[in-house]
Image (cartoon, helix red, strand yellow):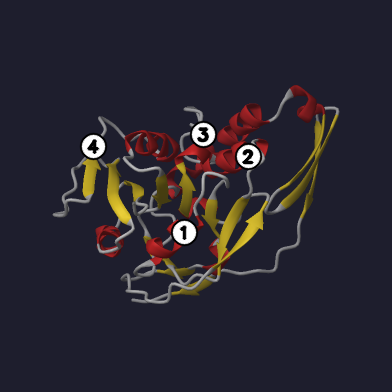
Amino acid sequence: MNKKLSIIIPTLQKNLEFLNQLINTLVVDSAVGEIIVIDNSTKGFGYNNDKVRVIIPDQNLFVNPSWNLGVKEAKYDYLGILNDDICIPQGFCSKIINDISENIGIIGTNGYSMINKSYEPEKITDTSYRLEETSFTTFNFGVMMFLHKNSFYEIPQDLKIFFGDDYLVFKNKKHHKKNFVIEDLVMYHYGSLSSNEFSSIIKKEASLYRKHTLSLLNRLLSYEKTRTRHIFRILGISVTINREDTRQTKTIYGG
């Protein structure tokens, strides 16, 4: 039996052109069994294809609770969690599904490889990429993630917008599963269509994330490496050292 993906896309419908182009790409991919659109705008969304299922909550669930809901609703064991503001290569899901396994953790995205676009989406035909093991989330890791249902751990409900991808990577590391990042993939990203207006709560959610992931012992004595910092915790005091990272995102601006 051929493996199939359940694709989960939360949306606020900030840019319907990008969302529709993304769904156009997904519905013709034979590896995609269903596309679950969680319409957090609550306005209603229509797309005439049997693969597309729209869930309209009573109010905006925000990002991480939408991921939780989408996974619960998914028919298939293989999952793709995608932003609504990206363009990916045609046929990409048929390739990446072969790398998904219940024995590994999360396959996320390296935002440094993305091309930021400020205008209309485009079709992409180059599906080449490589996977690199990672011990932490890379820039924009959660923009596009692939995983087996057994590698998804329900994200705490008080984490609404941020740190959902960090939590999934953390939980899979804790269960001795390797996480990976997609490198050298050609894809476009409109960029922060849905999260900019909520960025003021990032400090609050960072504190909540630490409570969910750090034991008392880890708070007293631990070392953590993230995308941007080395963090040393000694007797409850955190000392951070910035990591040098010279990589830059590619940006295309247009009218």
Q: Is residue 140 visible?
A: no
Q: Is residue 230 left or right of residue 22?
A: right
Image vertical order of residue 107 relative to residue 151, above or below: below
Residue at the far left in the pictured view: 48
Residue on which the image places disc 1:
98
Residue to which mark 3 is pinned: 153
Q: Nearer the viewer, mark 1 or mark 4?
A: 1
Q: Earlier in the sequence, mark 2 or mark 1?
A: 1
Of label 3 and label 2, which has the lower sequence position?
3
Q: Quadrant of residue 223?
A: top right
Residue 171: image x %, image y %? 60, 36
Counting labels gives: 4
- Bin the neighbour count of mark 1 within 10 Å (Cα to Cα): few under 14, some 14-19, many 20 and up: few
Residue type at mark 2: give it: Phe
The mark lying in front, picked from 4 and 3, is 3
Few, some or many residues within 10 Å of mark 4 (<14, 14–19, 20+) = some
Mark 1 secondary-structure assignment:
helix
Q: Secondary structure at mark 4?
A: loop
In-image side of 166 versus 118 (left or right):
right
SS of the residue under disc 3:
loop
Q: CA distance from mark 3 to mark 2?
A: 10 Å
Residue 115 falls left or right of residue 120 = right
Ranked by sequence position, the earlier of labels 4 and 3 is: 4
Name the residue beneath numbered marker 2. 170
Kindly identify the amino acid type of the residue bearing the numbered disc 4.
Ile
Closer to the observer: label 2 or label 1?
A: 1
| Of 156 and 126, the residue lying toward us | 126
**Quarter containing the C terminus:** bottom left
Report whether 191 appears left or right of 111: left
